[in-house]
Amino acid sequence: PKGFVDQTRGLLNYVNDRYPDTFHNMNYVCIGATSVQGSTKIFQGASLDELIAYWSYLPLAGNGNLLGDGIIPWDISCLPSATQVRLDSVKHSNLTDKDNWYGSEQNIDYWVHHLIGSVPMSSANAGIVEDAVSVVKPEI
């Protein structure tokens, strides 16, 4: 949004300017999370994660009180026409949570099969996937 510092240092504008729409005849998969609600209510108990999330979400989406992965709000993390994989508990990167981010060994099975086809998930994670992940596939 105008009037905010560009958190992406120009990357978001670069992508939006050069690729304004999705390419036709391609399948897109977007992966995002809803693990952190942005908040500035430090006197009501907001955590450091919630404060960082608020100030990360605000310049990206114009609203800091959203759900996201602590850096990117869910509301802007996915293309409308893409398969949307929402993870409820993961964080943005290993810098924000070294044990629980998109690339953590225990989280990869939740989303990687959407990228490479129908590779079955490991049996260790199969029972908890329904509670941890929401998938929205576009109507064609």
Image: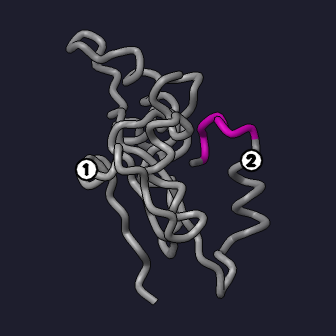
Picture layout, residue 23 above or below residue 93 = below
Residue at the spot x=44%, y=63% of the render?
84
Earlier in the chain: of badge 2 and badge 1, it is 2
Q: What is the residue that sits farthest to the top in this orientation?
A: 43
Residue at the spot x=29%, y=17% of the render?
46
Residue type marked 1:
Gly
Whether residue 80 is visible here, answered yes or no, is yes
Residue 101 badge:
none
Q: Are marks 2 and 1 in contact (CB under 8 Å)?
A: no
Whether residue 66 is visible here, answered yes or no, is no
Nearer-the-camera pick, 101 or 61: 101
* Secondary structure at numbered mark 2: helix
6 drawn magenta: yes
Picture layout, residue 19 above or below residue 44 = below
Residue 51 lies in what quarter of the image? top left
Residue type marked 2:
Leu
Nearer-the-camera pick, 17 or 91: 91
Identify the residue position indicated by label 2 in the image: 11
Residue 127 badge:
1
Return the x and y of residue 13 as percentages of the image width and height: 72, 53
C-alpha gap between disc 2 and disc 1: 38 Å
Q: Is residue 89 left or right of residue 127?
A: right
Mark 2 nearby-residue class (10 Å; few <14, some 14–19, many ≥20): few
Q: Which residues are magenta?
A: 2-9
The prevailing secondary structure element of the residues shown in magenta is loop
Return the x and y of residue 130 as percentages of the image width and height: 26, 55
Q: Is residue 85 left or right of residue 72?
A: left
Return the x and y of residue 43 as percentages of the image width and height: 24, 10
Mark 1 nearby-residue class (10 Å; few <14, some 14–19, many ≥20): few
